[in-house]
Image: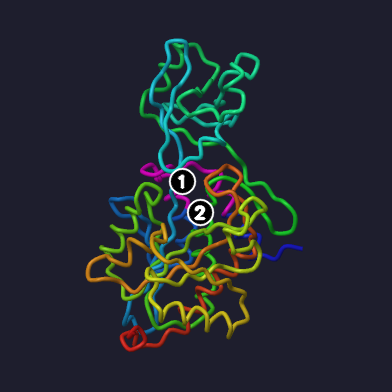
Amino acid sequence: MINAQMQSARDFLSLLSTASGVSGYEASIASLVMERFTPLADEVRCDTFGNVYALKKGNSKRSKIMLAAHMDEIGLIVKKIDPRGFLSFTSIGGVDQRTLLSQEVLVHGRETIPGIIGSLPPHLLQNEDLNQAVKMEEMAIDVGLSPAKLNEIIQVGDIITLKRELYPLLKHVMAGKSLDDRAGVVVMMVCLEELSRLQHFHDVIAVATTQEEVGLRGALTSAYTLNPDLAVAIDVTHASTPDTKGQVTIDLGKGPAVALGPNIHPAIYRHFSESAQEHRLPIQIEPIPGHSGTDAWAIQVTQAGIPTGLISIPLRYMHTSVETLDMQDVLNSGKLLAQFIASLPDNLEGFLCY
């Protein structure tokens, strides 16, 4: 039996995952986020960079707490239109080209049309090529249209996304595309819902950021705009599978990963750990010795420096169309974030002293 909060989170994640919003082209995702966050916040707005801000006012309004989760996804872009009607393409963000062959796609031109990614069948390959991964430049998208009709609808520079519905596995495990980091946006939704039942001193601004996959740009611009007193980024992290062979220590279904290391303010890490223990919420510890590769990296060094934390949802098969997570980790991340915020002291200056 799925409870109402779990069902709500799953429905929102399904909506976000299925939608298209490649880095730099997040407008359709932004509208979905604004619609969902409006009843949960006191004010919702969008900036000129495409970031969405949802303000939930605190009791004292002494300080600003920024939450950040990116809503963009990796994708493809039309590079060339072959005279015979095939589309050559390249990537936006860190697309794993090994996973592209035979994928269904949507090409977003004057109309959105379906296509498939193909290449030479094995029968026509030379023996030495049979065991090699097909390179992106050797693939093409076939949309089944004549060259004349295709040129009416599609042009060079049009965006392409993978076509994939969110797919339920056993229990609360889900698979789909762009769960990195639409799941983080769902975490912020859960946090805002939880905060409506809790008392908190400080204003909370949940930001769905843009262009993370191409350089953390939305986090940089929104953090500069807000200049918050404290910030927490929410992202995904690698969860272990048989082929990780001990390189990954985070497991699916055992709670969010709380980061520590030079990208993380130690007081924020300690408070996350204490909040989890007090409210009996499961967490995993993730030491990050350098660049976290998340919005936290950009936020930390914005303006004069912002005390920053990071919690991550365990995710298998990152940057593929079958990214896999446990919805219970998503809910627990949102609940932990809300308890962390509600238990912050009124005076953050003393709390954040090293």
Residue drawn at the location 30% of the way across and 71% of the way down? 306
- Residue found at the very far front of the displayed protein: 128
Which amino acid is tagged 1? Glu
- Residue found at the very far left of the displayed protein: 304
Observer-nearest of 213 and 147: 213
Q: Tell me if label 2 and label 1 are in contact, CB under 8 Å.
A: yes
Which amino acid is tagged 2? Arg
- What is the x, y in percent for residue 170? 75, 54
Please report whichever mark, 2 or 1, sits nearer to the chain's N-terminal start. 1
Compared across the picture, whether 70 is left or right of 186 comes to left
- What is the x, y in percent for residue 202? 38, 79
Residue 270 tag number: none
Compared across the picture, whether 344 is left or right of 46 comes to right
Distance from disc 2 to disc 1, alpha carbons, whole Å, reads 8 Å
Give the secondary structure at mark 2.
helix
- Please identify the quadrant where the C terminus is shown: bottom left
Compared across the picture, whether 85 is left or right of 314 comes to left
Give the secondary structure at mark 1.
loop
- What is the x, y in percent for residue 184? 50, 59
Q: Is residue 16 magenta?
A: yes
Q: Which residues are magenta?
A: 13-32
Residue 182 tag number: 2
Circle 1 residues within 10 Å: few <14, some 14–19, many ≥20: many
Residue drawn at the location 47% of the way across and 51% of the way down? 32
Q: Which residue is mark 1?
A: 73
Snapshot quadrant of residue 265: bottom left
- Magenta highlight: main SS: helix
Give the vertical position of 42 relative to 107 (above or below). Answer: below
- Please identify the quadrant where the N terminus is shown: bottom right
